Image (cartoon, rainbow, N blue to C red):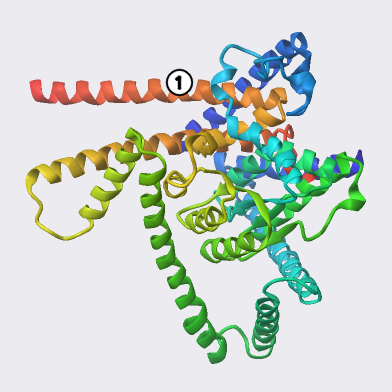
Amino acid sequence: MISQFAALSVVLVSAVALAIYGMRHQRGQREIPTMDAPVGTPAQESQSGERPSPTPFSRTHVQPPFRAFSDEVGRVAEAGAAIHVALGSGGLLGEQGMVSIAALQGLDALVTLSAAYDTPPFMTTGDATLYLLADTQLRSGYARAGNLRGYRHTAVQFIAPSPLLYAAQAATLAADESLGTNINLGAFDQEVSLLTDAALRKNVKLYGGAASALGLAALYPDIGREQLIMGEELFAGGAEVIGRSAFWGSLHTENLLRWLIVVAIIVTMLVSLSGTFMAGGG
Amino acid sequence: MFKNFLPTLMAVAAGFLVLLGYLVPIGFLPTLRQVLVRWATILAAFALLLAYANVLRVHIGRLFQKRAPYRVSSAILIAASFAILVLVVLEGPNHTLVQTWLQTVLIPGQSALLALTAVTLALAGTRLLRTSRNLYSVLFLLGALLTLLAAVPVAYPPIVHLVMQFVDAVATGGIRGLLLGVVLGILMTGLRIILGIDRPHSGG
């Protein structure tokens, strides 16, 4: 009961903080009117190529790989190649569901630009519910671009329900298509090395991100730090590419909760240390 | 408007009730949570049907393409799918033939893939030495080597044990830190969906 009460308190504090930070960011955004423009639009970037930051702290959240995704659309289209996006096996009913949703949000700019240029990325998933979500995302990207007729039903593919089989089959597909870029973003474990290995053999440009330590350990050797999205950075994609106040508010709330956790850890440590000393003294 | 409003309302209501069922386990809330989760599982089964329809659509389409690579593998996949479907419908999932297929094809295949993953990881380690020779790469490989050594049942000198314990403590601390950050991200993503700010189910 105590743990449930604590969890409820955390949820309530987070909701209130999200509302406050979201409103604060929205107010700040009115002073910088370009922030809501999608990534890649000229109005959003200054002459130096830097995006304006809504607060001095926001720069710490910016993850370069998310912005690079939309640049890849043009680069790959010029080369007459394709982008393969592997979303992993994080189903919506499982504990990795939010990781998959965050990954899809990080790909929003890529999807929108691809739909506008009618060069859809080739998306693969290892879970049925994630397949439906990715299909909806790509389809709505086409709808936003006013090109729903151009949507291809095979652009998003469900591969296999097991992570290993998914990775092996997606790696085979990645070797089939004339790929320019391979993005492995989502719920992955060590099986992602099959995908990165296949891409590297074809000299394909690699990006990747995972929330699990196993997935990151497999990605790190093959992907440079600049192209790697590590752990919680994955949840910053929505703020970076969509730029809505709610996403930035979430990041600030995460920062606040992180500090609360730090304080809680230090207090717990001090209390247990004092208990040890008192037991030793007594 | 109705097209977006109704799914959002349903998602918010369902999410809110399930969360309340977990956090405030009083009255009818836990039972309602169980019912909603069961409904979600049933819906996921339908999602699986749609996903398999996608698999068939892709591979049948590939069969009729003139220059599609791996047409044979598509043909094998379709044939195997139909054969297993017929077997399961006629004889049930516990029939000897279905079980034999599982034990002799699928499980050994997955084991082989797991072994292949170990090879690709080792290859990635050697590539790291060639491509980025910096402090982090050295630390990464050293950590991996020590962890591998720790798995070998040999009597190491005390100093090696001490180093292994140090690496283990650092790795455990790092993993816990990573998990804490991920959990915060998961919490905020879930909260945005429950509050209706974020609507991935409607593509927005």
**Amino acid at the residue labelled 1:** Trp
- At 39% across and 20% down in the image, what residue appears? A263
10 Å crowding of disc 1: few (<14), some (14-19), many (20+): few
- At 75% across and 20% down in the image, what residue appears? A44
Residue of label 1: A259
**The quadrant where residue B10 appears:** top right
Q: Where residue A173 sits: x, y (%)?
A: 64, 63
Q: Where residue A232 sits: x, y (%)?
A: 52, 34
Please indicate, yes or no, whether residue A236 appears anywhere in the rendered image. yes
Left or right: residue A243 versus residue A17 is right
Seen from the viewer's position, the closer of residues B42 and B182 is B182
Seen from the viewer's position, the closer of residues A156 and A275 is A156
Q: Where residue A259 sits: x, y (%)?
A: 45, 20
Picture layout, residue A251 above or below residue A148: above
Q: Where residue B109 sits: x, y (%)?
A: 48, 75
The C terminus of chain B: image quadrant:
top right
- At 57% across and 46% down in the image, what residue appears? A206
Please indicate, yes or no, whether residue A133 appears anywhere in the rendered image. no
Picture layout, residue B92 above or below residue B170: below
Identify the residue at the far top of this view.
Answer: A31
Left or right: residue B47 versus residue A160 is right
How many marks the image carries: the answer is 1
Q: Please give the chain letter of the residue carrying mark 1.
A: A
Seen from the viewer's position, the closer of residues A133 and A41 is A41
- At 48% across and 33% down in the image, what residue appears? B181
Picture layout, residue A190 above or below residue A217: below
The N terminus of chain B: image quadrant:
top right
Q: Secondary structure at mark 1?
A: helix
